[in-house]
């Protein structure tokens, strides 16, 4: 079995340190509450569907440290003014909460146009995707002015309908929330454009860049692309009427039946991932940070290399690996391993690694990535629970704890 490598191997590499600009951290996750049935309003287009589960009222907004050069996130549905409402011709709604809620839905039917095909409207998903990773970067107050067809209608997909409904309902003081059918379209349709499942295309980044610059943000394509995430299959608004949440979904033709959960406005925001900067130095690699950066690898449009296993788009260099461009490549020769790691000699010699590779691959039928092993296994008492998640994140493999203990430890 493989002998543990001494700690100095980390500093023998062309080392990378993940430097964080500093942030307030992730919003704590909570388990989804129990689902309840919801009635559909009379004015709604859709049949009755299952409502999102109730949540605690007056949920506090996440605390964000005042860090220079970071965008202060905010709820993109908040803040419509009297001027905005007059511009939208959504003024004068009155009556009970239900009457106001119905009036907003009727307003959407008259003033909005649903588009779900990016081939018809290339920017159709931009507000949804951008606000998911950087909440408030494209608020509703901008959307309703900028996203107009020649006939004056506001175009959008389901998220736009839910967001705009929420914003107008907030203005009128209704108890409203955005909910989602929390499945991914990429899981339902294998032919989906892969750029919607991870990362961001250079074309979309070019469209987003003016907004980043207007907000005073100097974020690179790599930073934005690794923070970009696939959003949920369908969004809708819900209004509390009496003791129940009622769905108000202005999108035509939505099938009944899916379960909906509350979709917090900041659920896709990850400051650590978004603002991480990579530089070279003499400290140990922040493997956890690297693993997070590789969550969406390979980056959209990244060519990389084809490794010895025939896998394309693998990291061509340590820099590409550490900036989340591509996963660790599979190499079988000492020359390739040493060149990638920028080291002269391998601790214990290459034959020892080759023996472990042979035993592991013969016993498991899986590839053994020597480069990842050298990077991770730096302490004599490395536990399986520490090694395996990092190894799998860096390689895209599925090593088990038992396999580590039998062949590697």
Image (cartoon, grey):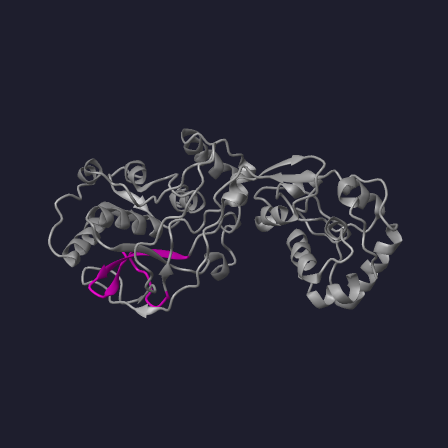
At which x and y percent is residue 316? Answer: 70, 41
Q: Nearer the viewer, residue 150 or 49?
A: 49
Residue at x-position 19% and y-position 59%: 43
Image: 296 above or below 384: above
Residue shown at 41% from the left, 38% from the top:
72
- The one nearer the camera, 349 or 340, is 349
Q: Is residue 57 left or right of residue 208?
A: left
Q: Quadrant of the C terminus?
A: bottom right
- Which image quadrant: the N terminus? bottom right
Residue 311 image offset from top left, x and y in percent: 69, 52
87 up-or-down from 409: above or below: above
Would you say 44 lies left or right of 192 here?
left
Residue 401 in magenta stretch: no
In front of the other: 171 or 247: 171
Residue 180, quarter of the rendered image: bottom left
Horizontal and vertical percent position of residue 132: 42, 47
What residue lies at 80% left-to-right and 65% top-to-bottom?
362
Viewer can see residue 201: no
Name the side, left or right, on which 337 lies relative to 209: right
Residue 245 appears in which quarter of the rendering?
bottom left
Residue at 78% across, 56% down: 380
Q: Is residue 373 visible?
A: yes
Q: Quadrant of residue 396?
A: bottom right
Q: In the rendered structure, which segment of residues is drawn in magenta?
A: 233-259
Task: Measuring from the top left, give residue 222's x and y in whole percent.
Answer: 56, 38
Can you say whether 80 is above or below 378 in the image? Answer: above
């Amino acid at each position: 079995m493989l002998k543990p490598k001494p700690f100095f191997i980390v500093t023998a590499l062309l080392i990378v340190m993940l430097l964080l600009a500093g942030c307030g951290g992730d919003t704590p996750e909570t388990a989804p509450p129990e689902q309840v049935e919801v009635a559909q309003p009379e004015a709604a287009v859709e049949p009755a569907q299952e409502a999102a589960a109730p949540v605690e009222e007056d949920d506090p907004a996440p605390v964000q440290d005042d860090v220079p050069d970071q965008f202060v996130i905010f709820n993109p549905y908040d803040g419509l003014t009297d001027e905005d409402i007059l511009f939208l011709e959504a003024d004068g709604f009155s009556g009970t909460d239900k009457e106001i809620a119905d009036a907003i839905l009727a307003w959407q039917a008259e003033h909005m146009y649903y588009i779900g095909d990016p081939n018809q409207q290339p920017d159709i998903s931009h507000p949804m995707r951008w606000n998911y990773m950087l909440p408030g970067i494209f608020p509703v107050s901008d959307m309703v002015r900028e996203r107009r067809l020649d006939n004056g209608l506001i175009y959008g997909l389901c998220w736009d309908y839910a967001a705009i409904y929420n914003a107008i309902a907030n203005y009128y003081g209704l108890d409203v929330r955005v909910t989602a059918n929390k499945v991914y379209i990429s899981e339902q349709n294998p032919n989906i454009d892969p750029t919607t499942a991870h990362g961001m295309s250079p074309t979309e980044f070019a469209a987003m860049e003016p907004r980043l610059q207007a907000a005073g943000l100097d974020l690179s394509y790599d930073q934005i692309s690794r923070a970009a995430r696939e959003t949920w299959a369908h969004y809708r608004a819900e209004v509390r009427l009496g003791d129940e949440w009622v769905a108000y979904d202005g999108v035509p033709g939505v099938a009944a039946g899916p379960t909906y959960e509350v979709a917090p406005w900041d659920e896709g925001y990850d400051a650590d991932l978004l603002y991480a900067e990579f530089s070279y130095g003499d400290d140990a690699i922040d493997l956890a940070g690297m693993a997070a950066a590789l969550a969406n690898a390979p980056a959209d449009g990244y060519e990389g290399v084809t490794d010895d296993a025939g896998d394309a788009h693998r990291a061509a260099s340590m820099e590409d690996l550490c900036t989340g461009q591509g996963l660790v490549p599979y190499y079988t020769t000492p020359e390739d391993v040493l060149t990638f790691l920028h080291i002269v000699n391998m601790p214990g010699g290459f034959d020892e690694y080759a023996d472990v590779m042979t035993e592991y691959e013969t016993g498991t039928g899986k590839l053994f990535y020597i480069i990842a092993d050298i990077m991770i296994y730096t302490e004599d008492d490395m536990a399986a629970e520490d090694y395996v998640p990092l190894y799998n994140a860096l390689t895209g493999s599925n090593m088990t704890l038992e396999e580590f203990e039998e062949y590697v430890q």
